[in-house]
Amino acid sequence: MKNKVNSRLVNKLNEKFNIQKEEIISSYKSIIDYSTFEITDVEKDKLIKYEEQVIFHGKEIIKNNIELAKIFSEAQKTLSSNKTGTFTKWFEALGFKKTFVYMCIKRNELFLEFEDSKIFDIPEKALFEISKIKDTVTKDKIKEAIKSNKPLEAVRTLNKESFGHRTIKKVDNNIEEAQVIEVFSNDEQEKTLKIIRAEIEVLMNKLEYLRLKEIEILKSSKFNEIK
């Protein structure tokens, strides 16, 4: 008798769960205009389901990256007093690449500073741009840029505004050279100096990132086969 009661209870709970699940699925509204896709209604229904799943799992990836970033940051602190290379040895033993780990740590640092989880969803280039200007642009302006639909463009605009008016000219090797044509006051010069130093730091980080990428490619079996 007890087993029958339990069975009925389980069935009711399952039924209730399935109803709630269907309500959640049916409440999803597509963010894509499928009228331009030239597809059948059946294909459209399938794609809307796939769209919902992609968005759901994409959010889960962001959640996981947030947790990973926290863990890597704490592990780095824990191993900071050990000999050089201990932290790298630790995460490589777990199967993680150096470029990914240090990008996670950079995102965590900016997340703690700007308190916006979208930091984990914006392009890497946007992170580099934020690093350039975070000491010279107000936190509120950077937060607005992070929340915008196009954070990279928004941050680059802030970078240009903070650096003053510039003109771009072409040199013989086709590299764009920025030449400041505005006469700065002492305060503006100090501000510009901070930006230049920040840009140097960002370029050094980019160089290190590219070197690590190069090493990864050279170590890959596919590259060796092609070679």
Image: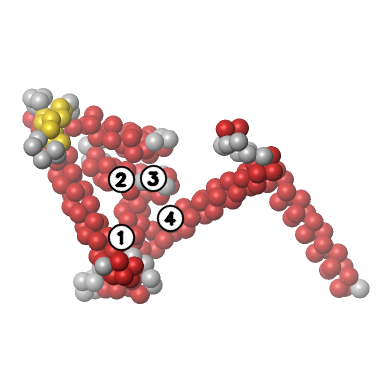
Left or right position of 192 against 138: left
Q: Residue type at mark 2?
A: Lys
Q: What residue is drawn where x is 74% and y is 55%?
A: 17
Q: Nearer the viewer, residue 5 or 176?
A: 176
User: Disc 2 versus disc 4: distance between alpha carbons?
Assistant: 18 Å
Left or right position of 92 against 167: right
Q: Nearer the viewer, residue 141 or 64?
A: 64
In the rendered view, would you say 151 is above or below 57? Answer: above
Q: Which mark is residue 147?
A: none
Left or right position of 178 against 221: left
Q: Which mark is residue 125?
A: 2
Is disc 2 placed on a helix, strand or loop? helix
Would you call the spot at circle 1 few (<14 residues within 10 Å), some (14-19), or many (20 or more)?
Answer: some
Q: Where does residue 181 sit, x and y in percent of width and height?
A: 10, 25
Q: Residue type at mark 3?
A: Ile
Q: What residue is drawn where x is 21% and y is 48%?
A: 202
Q: Residue type at mark 4?
A: Ile
Q: Which residue is mark 1?
A: 99
Q: Residue type at mark 1?
A: Thr
Going from N to C along the chain, the mark reached first, 4 or 3, is 4
User: Disc 2 versus disc 3: distance between alpha carbons?
Assistant: 8 Å
Q: Quadrant of residue 148?
A: top left
